[in-house]
Amino acid sequence: MKTLQKVLVTVASAALTAGAALGAHTAPAYAASSPTPIDTDNFWLTADYGSTYSEPVAGLVAQAGRASVGTVMDHANHSRTPSTAISTQVHGFIWDSGDNNDSDVAPQGITTTRDAVGTANNGRYDGRQLIAASFYNNDPKGSRINLTDWDSNYPNKYRYILLVEPTGTKAAPSFKDVQIHVGGIAWYGNYLYVADTGSGMRVFDMSKIIKTETGGDKSLIGKHGDKFYAHNYAYALPQVGKITSHVATGTTKLTWSTISLDRPKKSIVMTEYKCPTNVTCKYPKGTTRAIRFPFASGSTKFAATTKASQALNTPFHYLNGVASHNGRWWFNDSHDQKLFYWGGSGSVSSYKWVKWGESLSYWEDATGPDELWSLQEGKGNRNVFAVKQASYDG
């Protein structure tokens, strides 16, 4: 990443002096047990990429107008600044004071253009090297992504895009808020896959960002008169599809807490946030599962029906993040501030990790070390950061 020198020297220097209070790297300890395989036939997906939303999406693009990712970033209007979340990081930044301190929003998922396109064109989608993070919003209730430039050719800026669900018809389109937790996201080709906790995933097309009106009443959403509004955001991203999760009779429904892309394996992996059975907890309890679902051959879409290609019972709990790369796995336990690594067989390595850790994303690099990106949820401490994956692979 030779283009990233402008800010990163400062960040790396800060990381070297951060100290143990910021989560210093420690030698791995080994968990008493490892993930174990379970029957993949018990888990499958059904995919709808068009029948529900194609008509209103076409109407929205025609009537509101389309904006490319490059155009959105040319108008980025929020500033990121260098920051340190953990002493081992190689890069890091923090959102502006509004996002860092707003109690009505919380960052959750993370993905990058290295997921979207791999190392082609130095990881650039529409000419930009980007970090995408999902936020859920409480006022108004909805969800969004922050698209952040990660390239010294451009300013250190980011821009909001509201996630919306299309309604109406091609002739009379509108949209409403996507009121989900957005616990994990994965960008593959043009498609942005977003975890929907109780259902599976929602699908958005990054080539179909629409323009919306700014100014006026912040509460306005959808079409009013001949204009489209998205709570004063200048851009909205309409849902184009839905991936529905199914389980066999007698199998507990999956909780889609977080997801990420395994690009070499051409699959999405998901895991659940579960508490141990012996603690008081408002969230589901029991064994935490991690499941892999492959994309259709040669495609960035799932087939109409997709059976899991790997299914695991894990010994972990409180998982807010998962990543996999070519069959290796990382799991983020946000409660105990640990990052677990499992190579697909044998023992598990455990590392000290950050407080309020959320999703994970694997960053492939053709000329430098591969990285793991993550982010923090806690108000006042919402850092986004990367570490060398080789330092966390056992």
Image (cartoon, rainbow, N blue to C red):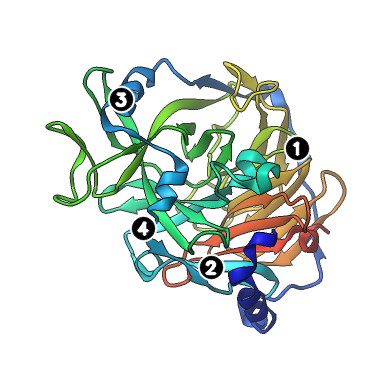
- 2 or 3: tag closer to the N-terminus: 3
Q: Quadrant of the C terminus?
A: bottom right
User: Mark 2, mark 3: which one is toward the viewer?
Assistant: 3
The picture places residue 368, in percent across and down from the top left corner, at 77, 58
The picture places residue 249, in percent across and down from the top left corner, at 58, 21
Q: Which residue is mark 3?
A: 62
Q: Residue at x 68, y 68 (%)?
A: 90
Q: Which residue is mark 1?
A: 264
Q: Which residue is mark 4?
A: 105
Q: Report the Cα–Cα distance between label 1 and label 4.
A: 33 Å
The picture places residue 311, in percent across and down from the top left corner, at 71, 34
- 2 or 1: tag closer to the N-terminus: 2
The one of 128 and 54 positioned closer to us in this rendering: 128
Under circle 1, the secondary element is loop
Q: Report the Cα–Cα distance between label 2 and label 4.
A: 18 Å
- 3 or 1: tag closer to the N-terminus: 3
Under circle 2, the secondary element is strand
The type of residue carrying mark 4 is: Val
The image's mark for residue 219 is none
Q: Which residue is mark 2?
A: 93
